């Protein structure tokens, strides 16, 4: 029997299909990102005990984080090219399995050099996961839904902090000495191996795109494809050199600089928050579990704000200020931690940092898809994220160096705040460039008539 295809423009039916995609796809990708982010930040909790055992200074610990991001950044673009060539199902499954094994292997580190080696492998194997998922979302969701899709995926970061922080604290407190291993070693095993299992599930569950999704009917596949084609025009850039040339256009250069600066705030919050909170409340003698619970509070706030702010951005179809305002809030948070004296006020600063950075990042990724052609997106998104990984590689060294030299966190926090302010400026510059381009296009069309 022939399949009945809905009308080309049936927004009610199309919206229903998109909501179905939210239920089936975003929830699964959300789980994957939780374990990705957990494996990225658990070294921050491990450092509470690991640094002393391995005799790591703040600079050496920062170098361990840097090496992870060096591997990640170097293989970023090749990974996204492979994702497009081999398909999301196979490539994302490969990423999960290999990084999970490498992350668990961190338990065998016996000194700085072995720690550097294993963190380099984790970075290489995980490379391309985040930009790959960002690219994958453009295959499924039109621009009018993209902020909500990205935000719901990105809330995995604060959710991971909410549950991962207390979990990491409990593992450190209650597994120490089990089978003769320190708690921080068990931390890497317990939080790393689930990624391997999820990689196997990904291979059988995920589809390369709407056309391959078993949970969509033929009607729904056609409706979703019609909506995507109607809201995002076909690429005028040919694959190959034409796509690579987009990397040197002004909007992409500006976005790369902006993301470089934004990641300074994200990385500072993810990798150093446990040590910062411990120092802020050092007079209270809190356990690792209590420190984890304190870090979870700002993430709870970020979780709520990300959902509301993303939906508001889609309703208004405005992106720039929805990125700039949260980023500036994060900058204020870092300054508050640096200059405030009361512990509750400094904890409020941590909340500003988490809320602003997570929210700003989730909406930031709606902008590249708007300025890149469809053929340029695999390379362009990976290129922008690569500079974020370069920033993540550099920032721990700067953070640790300033901490060691000044014996205080204030200099590092002021540095991060300044970088976030610069990020806001470049995002605004992209908007200004787009406004000029739109005005030029309107004038050219009027002259042609």
Image (tube, helix red, strand yellow):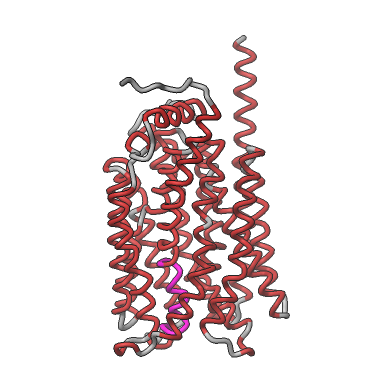
Q: Is residue 54 above or below residue 347?
A: below
Point out residue 408 in the picture as x, y percentages from the top left corner: 60, 80
What's the residue at 40%, 43% (across, down)? 136
Split into 4 quadrants, where in the image is the N terminus?
Answer: top left
The answer to which image quadrant residue 236 occupies is top left
Measured as percent of width and height from the top left, residue 38 is found at 44, 66
Q: Nearer the viewer, residue 5 or 180?
A: 5
- The residue at the far top in this view is 449
* Residue occupying the point 63% across, 81% down: 280
Residue 43 in magenta stretch = yes
Horizontal and vertical percent for residue 395?
50, 66
> In the image, is residue 194 part of the stretch drawn in magenta?
no
Who is closer to the viewer here, 160 or 399? 160
From what the image shows, is residue 364 above or below residue 399?
A: above
Q: Residue at x 73, y 80 (%)?
A: 342
Q: Which stretch did the figure color magenta?
A: 39-51
Count of all numbered marks drawn on residues in the image: 0
Position of residue 431 in the picture relative to residue 247 (left or right):
right
Q: What is the quadrant of the C terminus in the image?
A: top right
- Up/down of 96 relative to 364, above or below: below
The residue positioned farthest toward the front in the image shown = 1
Left or right relative to 249: residue 342: right
Q: Position of residue 330 (x, y in %)?
A: 64, 61
Residue 266: image quadrant is: bottom right
Q: In the displayed structure, would residue 432 be above or below residue 365?
A: above
């Amino acid at each position: 029997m022939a399949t009945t295809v809905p009308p080309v423009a049936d927004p009610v039916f199309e919206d229903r299909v998109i909501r179905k995609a939210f239920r089936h796809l975003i929830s699964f990708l959300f789980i994957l990102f939780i374990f990705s982010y957990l494996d990225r930040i658990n070294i921050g909790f491990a450092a509470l005990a690991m640094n002393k055992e391995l005799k790591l200074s703040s600079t050496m610990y920062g170098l361990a984080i840097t090496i992870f991001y060096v591997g990640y950044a170097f293989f970023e673009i090749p990974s996204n090219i492979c994702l497009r060539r081999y398909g999301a199902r196979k490539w994302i499954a490969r990423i999960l399995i290999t990084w999970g094994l490498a992350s668990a292997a961190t338990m065998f580190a016996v000194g700085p050099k072995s720690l550097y080696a294993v963190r380099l492998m984790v970075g290489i194997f995980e490379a391309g996961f985040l930009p790959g998922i960002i690219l994958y979302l453009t295959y499924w969701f039109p621009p009018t839904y993209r902020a909500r899709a990205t935000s719901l995926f990105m809330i995995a970061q604060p959710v991971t902090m909410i549950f991962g922080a207390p979990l990491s604290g409990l593992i450190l407190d209650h597994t120490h000495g089990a089978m003769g291993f320190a708690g921080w070693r068990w931390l890497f095993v317990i939080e790393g191996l689930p990624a391997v299992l999820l990689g196997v599930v990904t291979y059988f569950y995920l589809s390369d795109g709407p056309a391959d999704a078993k949970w969509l009917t033929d009607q729904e596949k056609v409706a979703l494809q019609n909506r995507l084609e109607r809201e995002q025009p076909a690429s005028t850039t040919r694959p190959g050199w034409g796509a690579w040339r987009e990397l040197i256009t002004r909007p992409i250069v500006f976005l790369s600089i902006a993301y470089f600066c934004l990641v300074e705030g994200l990385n500072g919050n993810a990798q150093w928050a446990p040590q910062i909170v411990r120092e802020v409340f050092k007079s209270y003698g809190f356990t690792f579990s209590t420190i984890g619970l304190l870090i979870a509070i700002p993430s709870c706030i970020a979780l709520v704000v990300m959902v509301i702010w993303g939906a508001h951005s889609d309703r208004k179809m405005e992106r720039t200020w929805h990125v700039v305002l949260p980023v500036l809030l994060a900058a204020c948070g870092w300054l508050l931690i640096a200059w405030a004296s009361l512990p509750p006020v400094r904890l409020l600063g941590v909340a500003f940092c988490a809320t602003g950075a997570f929210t700003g990042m989730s909406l930031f990724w709606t902008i590249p898809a708007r300025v890149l052609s469809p053929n340029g997106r695999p390379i362009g998104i990976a290129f922008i994220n690569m500079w974020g990984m370069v920033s993540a590689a550099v920032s721990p060294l700067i953070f640790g160096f300033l901490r060691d030299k000044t014996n205080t966190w204030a200099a590092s926090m002021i540095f991060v705040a300044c970088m976030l302010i610069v990020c806001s400026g470049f995002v605004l510059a992209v908007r200004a460039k787009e406004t000029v381009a739109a005005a030029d296009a309107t004038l050219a069309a009027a002259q042609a008539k």
